[in-house]
Amino acid sequence: MRKLTKSSDKMLAGVCSGIAEYFGWDATWVRIAYAALTLFFGTGIILYIILAIVMPANTSWE
């Protein structure tokens, strides 16, 4: 069973790379999409802060 968690491969808080790991995507593309959505719609910063607080840290040592 997969869980959405922050990743240890992080640039700020590990939210984008955690989302990428959950869906099996490349973290770079998720970060680019996040940056584009933030620039065009402006709500990405608040969403990122909320996700950084709500998402648990990855505690597995896989």
Image (spheres, rainbow, N blue to C red):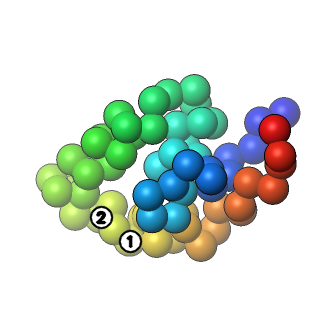
Mark 1: which amino acid? Ile
**Quadrant housing residue 19:** top right
| Percent of width and height locating residue 5 | 68, 52
**In this view, which residue lies farthest toward the top?**
24
Q: Find disc 2 in the rendering and name its residue.
A: 43
Give coordinates of residue 51: x percent, y percent.
54, 63
**Image height of 50 relative to 3, above or below:** below
**What element does badge 2 sit on?**
loop
In the image, 8: left or right of 30? Answer: right
- Quick check: 33 left or right of 21? left
Question: Relative to residue 5, is residue 11 drawn left or right?
Answer: left
Q: CA distance from mark 2 to mark 1?
A: 6 Å
Q: Which mark is residue 34?
A: none
Question: Circle 1 sits on which residue?
Answer: 46
- Residue at 51% in and 55% down: 10
What residue appears at the point 24 percent right and 57 percent down from the top-left corner? 38
* Residue drawn at 83 percent across, 46 percent down: 61
Q: How many marks?
A: 2
Picture layout, residue 35 above or below residue 47: above
24 lies above or below 32: above
Which residue occupies 57% across, 26% down? 24
Where residue 39 appears, as percent x and y from the top left, is 17, 56
Estimate the x, y position of residue 50 in percent, counting from the top left: 51, 70
The amino acid at mark 2 is Thr
Circle 2 packing at 10 Å, graded few (<14), some (14-19), many (20+), is few
